Image (cartoon, rainbow, N blue to C red):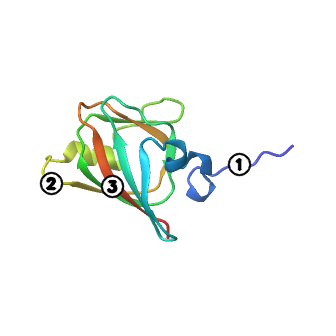
Amino acid sequence: MTTKVIDQTDPTQWDPKLDAVIAAPGNHKVLFENDRLRVLEVILKPDEEEPTHHHRWPSVFVFDQVEGPIHDFAPDGTMMPPNRDVIQAVQAWDGQGCLVVHMAPQPAGRVLNASSKTLHGIRVEMKS
């Protein structure tokens, strides 16, 4: 028996069943999709934790409502260090206007909104 090794640094090899829209549909709604872009509305209520999922494409995330603390967890439940792009951006944001974050592909994990405010934003994923 041979076991296929999946390169976790290669988004093309990530499990399609863990795509955000499939694995966490209560938090990710497709607003538009074509062969180059997918536009998602993302909502995470206060004290809500998303199911484990990934985002295989680079994206721009525009938050019109977000407040810390927000925590990232690996699939095994380990809290990720607070050095990830969106966590750093939220911590540095002054709360004025919208927060725009350029994001690399994100491997499987989940987010906990530990704040008292609903997280809401639009994520534009670039497929090519």
Number of callouts: 3
Rendering coords of residue 85 (x, y %): 34, 50
Above or below — where is 62 with respect to 74? below
Rendering coords of residue 86 (x, y %): 32, 48
User: Label 3: how many residues lie within 10 Å, few (<14), some (14-19) or many (20+)?
Assistant: many
Amino acid carrying label 1: it is Val
Residue under the point 51% across and 43% down = 53
Dot 1 corresponds to which residue?
5
Q: Which mark is residue 38?
A: none
Residue under the point 87% across and 43% down = 1
Disc number lying in front (3 or 1): 3
Q: Is residue 94 left or right of residue 62?
A: left
Q: Is residue 107 visible?
A: no
Q: Which mark is residue 122?
A: 3
User: Label 1: how many residues lie within 10 Å, few (<14), some (14-19) or many (20+)?
Assistant: few
Q: Is residue 97 left or right of residue 7?
A: left
* Tag 1 and tag 2, C-beta contact below 8 Å: no
Rendering coords of residue 10 (x, y %): 58, 56
Residue under the point 23% across and 30% down = 116
Residue under the point 38% across and 37% down = 81
Amino acid carrying label 2: it is Gly
Above or below — where is 91 with respect to 46? below
Amino acid carrying label 3: it is Ile
Disc number lying in front (1 or 2): 2
Dot 2 corresponds to which residue?
97
Q: Earlier in the sequence, mark 3 or mark 2?
A: 2
Give the structural element (helix, strand or loop) at label 3: strand
Q: Quadrant of residue 40?
A: bottom left
Give the structural element (helix, strand or loop) at label 2: loop
